[in-house]
Image (cartoon, grey):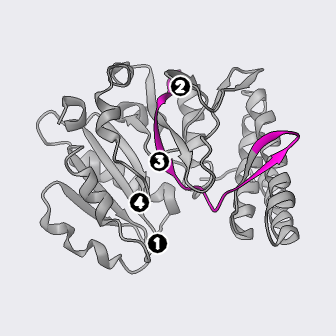
Amino acid sequence: MSPLAQRTAAVVVVYRTDSDPSALIAQLRPQVGLTIVADNTAQGHPALDGLAQLPDVLRIHNANQGALAGAYNQALQVLQAHQARPGGFTHVVFLDEDSDASNLTTFLVDAEVRDTLERTDTAAVAPAYRDRATGLRGKYIELTRWRLRYLPRDFAGMRQVAFVINSMSVWRLDALARIGHFNQGLAVDHVDTEACLRARTAGLRVWVHGSHTFAHSIGQRRAFTLFGRQMQAGGHSASRRRMIGRNTAWLGRRYLWREPAFAALCLMRLGYETAGILLAEDHRWRKLAALWQGVVAGLLTLTLA
């Protein structure tokens, strides 16, 4: 195990009782110094009962308090208390229960990844994700105050971006201490985006290495074409669409003056969600109504915390 891997802890959030995260935990143990499993199921996931016997795995039962953000925050509190080990931990990698961590070691030993993670102005470094359902790579954005630019889906090498998804992203612990807790008011959607924006405001940088990829599932995505461009519909439920609408509108309003280009991106995201619902999903009108009810709620809500 590399020195960076030894100083890296993994946080796995488990939230579905019909899943079995045992394979992922076994996959992680030889790749990182410590694995923290945040159990977000209501009664406790039965597949996690044997973890107490493993010296390099910690289980915490969060019971979905604060949803995904709450699980992250509780895991980070536990990790902070665990810092008594010699040398301590300097980095944390976040994963979902269905994440593919098979290439984590390859990612951490990459010299460019390692050197970027050692920079004090770095907040996080992530590999590029590829959606399991559609096979498409995720889109990443370069952002200045007044301008945004989508990177090509197939870019290679290290690129500074506006934000990354938390799954498989490696964060510096001192950067997380500097920007504060994940926002539990957001619950799930845009928890990672908002943290990256706070890091950006603090003068820290977020990176993606396009030469490293991992498989990831976001909703039940379906590919569709609009004006000749390949796009992906999220496939989320109406209730989740309401949260997406609320959080997107709230973030766009919050950063309207500080990051006008990001606020424009939020408006584009709402248009993208609307198009995906209309062109590629079932229960269109119910989901569309939920999305825009959420938008109204987000515009009228002063604080989400």
* Image point (21%, 57%), residue name: 57
* Residue 145 left/right relative to 2: right
- Helix, strand or loop at disc 1? loop
The Cα atoms of the two marked residues, 4 and 2, are separated by 27 Å
Please tell me which residue lies in front, 101 or 115: 101
Please tell me which residue lies in front, 63 or 189: 189
Rendered image: mark on residue 202: 2
- Helix, strand or loop at disc 3? loop
The Cα atoms of the two marked residues, 4 and 1, are separated by 10 Å
- Which residues make up the magenta segment? 203-230
* Image point (77%, 48%), residue name: 249
The Cα atoms of the two marked residues, 1 and 3, are separated by 16 Å
The answer to whether the residue labelled 4 contacts the one labelled 2, judged by CB atoms less than 8 Å apart, is no
The Cα atoms of the two marked residues, 3 and 2, are separated by 22 Å
- Helix, strand or loop at disc 4? strand
Residue position marked by numbered label 4 in the rendering: 13
Residue position marked by numbered label 1 in the rendering: 16
Label 1 vs label 2, nearer the camera: 1
Question: Does the magenta portion include 205?
Answer: yes
Rendered image: mark on residue 208: none
First along the sequence among labels 3 and 4: 4
Rendered image: mark on residue 167: 3
Amino acid beneath label 4 = Val
First along the sequence among labels 1 and 3: 1
Q: Residues within 10 Å of mark 1 (few under 14, many from 20)?
A: some
Amino acid beneath label 1 = Arg
First along the sequence among labels 3 and 2: 3
Amino acid beneath label 2 = Ala
